Amino acid sequence: MGQTQAPSRRAVLASLALGPTAARAEAVPPQAIRFGLTPVFLDSDLALIRDLESYLNAATGVPVELIKRRTYREVTAMLLSGQLDAAWICGYPFVQHRSALALLAVPLHRGSPLYQSYLITGADSSARHLGDLRHQSHAFSDPDSNSGFLVTRWLLAQHGDRPEGFFTRTFFAHGHRNVIRAVATGLAQSGSVDGYVWEVMADREPHLTAGTRVLARSDWHGFPPICCLASTRGGAVARALSAALVEMPRSDLGQRILGTLHLDGWVAGDPSWFDGIARMSAAVRSSDP
């Protein structure tokens, strides 16, 4: 008998159009779906990463490779260049590259696809509003983070200020948990952080958030989404990933992942949820010299 050749990745992905059952009937393709992760993730929990890989492998019928990078910029660049099939990014990079990117899924937290940015200080700080933080040190999460940078940058711009002139010292902690830790330990006197992450940490690590205090909460914005290239949104990979995410609450493993992340599920998403971020981004650009 002649040797049977493994099907090409194209053939296997084409089978996804027929549904997960048909895809799983195919042999394993030689190349995985490439899924990028950023500091949106709460931490580097190996069990969570393993569960997510297992769930996506089973739900799509194609091996999924989770690729983690330290900054939003690295992951966004990989997504835009086609090195990733999809990535969990932030609303700020999404609006910056709106013509090139499309939504695959948006998380639901406490039943809503929206979240807030928190401005935090040390628990013992006497500050009552943003103006009281002038001439203090401040920790940002990432220069491409909405909650961890843009919101505070925009608030300062409304008064003609910039971070480098308003604060005595600023730095990027590259992770919302790192911002909370920096403020809690006194490495920074204040910080800009994802409200969802702060709330989850208040439940999981209350000893850490106890060293901080929420000074102000922003308006509601679209939760950090999972995106793909707009040119691939109608393709088999994108449709399979989107379906896998939306159907996550229907499996025991999916429910375990959602429980770890303190999420309720995923929805397809509406680009208008990110209009507020787009307006802040435009305002900040216009205020730059």
Image: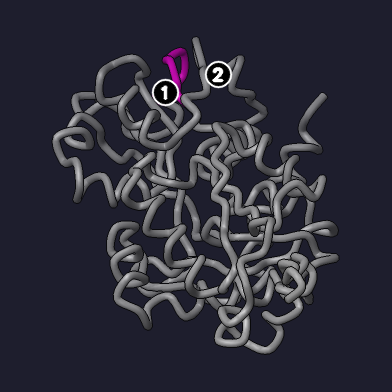
Residue 233 falls left or right of residue 274:
right
**In the rendered view of the protein, which quadrant contains the C terminus?**
top right
* For residue 65, above or below residue 211: below
Amino acid type at circle 2 is: Phe
Instruction: Determine the residue positioned at 34% across, 22% down.
Output: 182
Q: Quadrant of residue 25?
A: bottom right
Q: Residue furthest left?
A: 207
Residue 102 is situated, as x and y percent measured from the top left of the image, at 74, 65
Where does label 2 land, which residue?
166
Residue 82 is situated, as x and y percent measured from the top left of the image, at 80, 50
Amino acid type at circle 1 is: Leu
Q: What is the secondary structure assignment of the residue under circle 1?
A: helix
Q: What is the secondary structure assignment of the residue under circle 2?
A: helix
Residue 261 falls left or right of residue 160:
left
Stretch in magenta: 132-140
Residue 158 in view, yes or no = no
Q: Are marks 1 and 2 in contact (CB under 8 Å)?
A: yes
Viewer-proximal residue, 171 or 220?
171
Instruction: Determine the residue positioned at 66% across, 60% down.
Output: 227
Residue 169 is situated, as x and y percent measured from the top left of the image, at 50, 11
Q: CA distance from mark 1 to mark 2?
A: 8 Å
Where does label 1 land, which residue?
133
Residue 9 falls left or right of residue 125:
right
